[in-house]
C-alpha cells in the first residue's frame, strides 16, 4: 500500500445549499467509484469552492457519504479573473495498492479545467 493524491472538480448550477450538496455528492461518488475507494482508506479531503459559492460546506455531503472520521477542510479558491464560476474542487489523499492508477474526475462544465486528462472525463 502507498499514499496517493487524487483531484476532482464539479460545477454547481446555482449558489444554493442543495445544489452544492448534490454536486459534491456526485463528485465524491464518482471519485470513489472510479478508484474503488472507501472512507476507511481515505486520509483527508481538501475542498475548495469558487468565491461565488457560499451557501453550504461541501464537507457536509462528504460526511453524509460516511466520511465522518476523515479530516475534511473547506477553503476558498483563488479568484482569478475569467476563471470558471461555480466550481467545487477536491484533493483526496488515500491509501491503495502499489499498482493503483489514480483516476481523476472532472464533471460537467468543470471538464474544461483538465481536458488533458482523458481518464478524468
Image: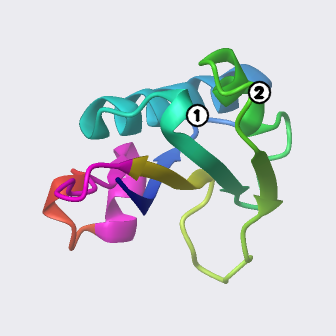
Task: Answer left or right for 102 relative to 10.
Answer: left
Is residue 94 depicted above or below 66 in this figure? below
Q: Report the span colored magenta.
A: 96-114
Towards the viewer: 101 or 116: 101
Residue 30: % across, % down: 36, 33
Is residue 112 depicted above or below 105 in this figure? below
- Residue 110 painted magenta: yes
Task: Answer left or right for 52 relative to 104.
Answer: right
According to the image, label 2 marks what residue?
60
Q: Residue at x 16, y 57 (%)?
A: 99
> Picture quarter containing residue 36?
top left
The numbered mark at residue 24 is 1
- Residue 54 painted magenta: no
Residue 55: % across, % down: 85, 35
Judged from the image, the secondary structure of the residue bearing numbered disc 2 is: helix
Q: Residue at x 72, y 37 (%)?
A: 58
The numbered mark at residue 93 is none
**CA–CA distance between discs 1 and 2?**
9 Å
Task: Answer left or right for 101 relative to 30.
Answer: left
> Picture quarter containing residue 22?
top right
Residue reaching furthest to the right: 55
Residue 25: % across, % down: 55, 26
Residue reaching furthest to the bottom: 81
Residues at circles 1 and 2 in contact by the CB criterion of under 8 Å: yes
Amino acid at each position: 500500500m502507498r499514499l496517493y493524491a487524487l483531484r476532482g472538480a464539479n460545477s454547481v448550477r446555482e449558489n444554493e445549499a442543495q445544489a452544492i450538496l448534490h454536486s459534491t455528492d456526485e463528485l465524491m461518488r464518482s471519485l470513489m467509484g472510479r478508484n474503488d475507494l472507501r472512507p476507511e482508506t481515505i486520509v483527508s479531503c481538501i475542498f475548495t469552492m469558487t468565491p461565488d459559492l457560499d451557501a453550504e460546506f461541501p464537507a457536509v455531503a462528504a460526511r453524509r457519504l460516511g466520511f465522518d472520521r476523515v479530516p475534511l477542510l473547506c477553503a476558498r479558491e483563488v479568484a482569478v479573473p475569467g476563471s470558471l464560476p461555480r466550481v467545487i474542487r477536491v484533493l483526496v489523499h488515500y491509501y491503495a495498492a502499489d499498482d493503483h492508477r489514480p483516476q481523476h474526475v472532472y464533471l460537467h462544465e468543470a471538464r474544461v479545467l483538465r481536458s488533458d486528462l482523458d481518464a478524468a472525463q
